Image (cartoon, helix red, strand yellow):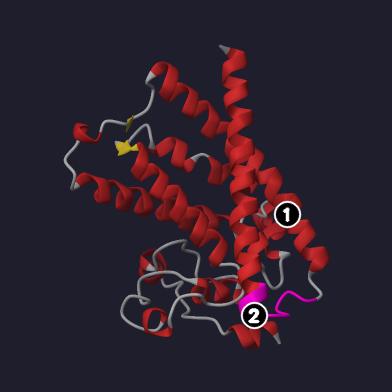
């Protein structure tokens, strides 16, 4: 049993690492095509981001692998594979519930990481990326990576979710984590500057966090930032790069 758990944890770490390399590499390639020269001179920084991120991938993979084994071998979780177990309308609702819960967890742990002592110990690793690049999405100190690694594995014990809906959650998490750091906005202006952008976080919103630190802590939604008075609007990429 122990060997099976260890193998599952190792396999999941490899999967998370490959997912990071593919996603960040894809967005880095898109940046090279759409914003040529944006990452010029940042080669050493990007190498550091990749190394921290691969370490984070291992940390993320361990609890995920243990939970995956428990789901398959012991039925520990509330993940289900038969789409008829719950009404079809619950599929999108479960995705939304996971994103809302993850966003809440991220906001408060992220804000906690900005306490001076914790920032020096852990979160400074992430903010060493100045400006952040597409490779910085998982560039965390191990202590910070651990706070992020436990949230989705924890939620599968509490909120029922279809395995396909869980894949959607992980895909959204990956895309938003990478695109929010790549240094330019991939979403159209009408979305970012319009009513939808007033509540959704994109790269323009997270850019301001990397400019001023004590604001814009959210991951997917601006709800907590607005409620707690930490929403400072959208950043300007040209000014930040200059």
Q: Position of residue 19 (x, y in %)?
A: 59, 48
The mark that comes first in sequence, 1 or 2, is: 2
Q: Quadrant of the N terminus?
A: top right
Decide whether residue 62 is among the magenta residues.
no
Residue of label 1 = 50
Question: In the rendered view, does 125 fall on the left or right side of 148?
Answer: right
Res. 67 mark: none
Along the viewing direction, whichever of 116 and 188 lies nearer the viewer: 188
Along the viewing direction, whichever of 75 and 205 lies nearer the viewer: 75
Q: Which residues are magenta?
A: 32-40
Along the viewing direction, whichever of 236 and 169 lies nearer the viewer: 169
Q: Is residue 28 above or below residue 231?
A: above
Question: In the rendered view, does 46 fall on the left or right side of 35?
Answer: right
The kind of secondary structure element at disc 2 is loop
Judge the density around disc 2: few (<14), some (14-19), many (≥20) Cα neighbours within 10 Å: few
Q: Position of residue 17 (x, y in %)?
A: 64, 44
Q: Position of residue 25 (x, y in %)?
A: 65, 59
Q: Nearer the viewer, mark 1 or mark 2?
A: 2
Give the Cα distance between marks 1 and 2: 20 Å
Main SS of residues in magenta: loop
Residue of label 2 = 35
The kind of secondary structure element at disc 1 is helix
Q: Quadrant of the C terminus?
A: bottom right
């Amino acid at each position: 049993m122990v060997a099976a758990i260890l193998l599952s944890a190792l396999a999941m770490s490899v999967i998370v690492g490959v997912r990071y390399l593919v996603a960040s590499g894809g967005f880095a390639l898109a940046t090279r095509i759409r914003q040529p020269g944006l990452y010029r001179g940042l080669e050493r920084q990007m190498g550091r981001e990749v190394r921290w991120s691969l370490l984070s991938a291992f940390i993320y993979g361990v609890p995920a692998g243990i939970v995956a084994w428990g789901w398959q071998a012991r039925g520990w979780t509330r993940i289900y594979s038969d789409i008829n177990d719950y009404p079809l309308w619950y599929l999108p609702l479960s995705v939304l519930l996971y994103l809302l819960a993850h966003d809440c967890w991220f906001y408060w742990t992220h804000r906690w990481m900005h306490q001076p002592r914790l920032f020096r110990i852990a979160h400074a690793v992430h903010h060493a990326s100045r400006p952040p690049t597409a490779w910085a999405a998982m560039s965390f100190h191990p202590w910070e990576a651990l706070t992020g690694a436990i949230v989705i594995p924890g939620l599968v014990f509490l909120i029922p979710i279809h395995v396909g809906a869980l894949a959607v959650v992980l895909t959204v998490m990956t895309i938003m984590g990478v695109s929010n750091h790549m240094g330019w906005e991939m979403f159209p202006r009408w979305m970012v500057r319009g009513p939808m952008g007033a509540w959704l976080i994109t790269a323009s919103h997270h850019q301001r966090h990397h400019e001023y630190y004590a604001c814009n802590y959210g991951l997917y939604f601006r709800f907590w930032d607005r409620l707690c008075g930490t929403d400072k609007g959208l950043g300007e990429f040209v000014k930040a790069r200059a």
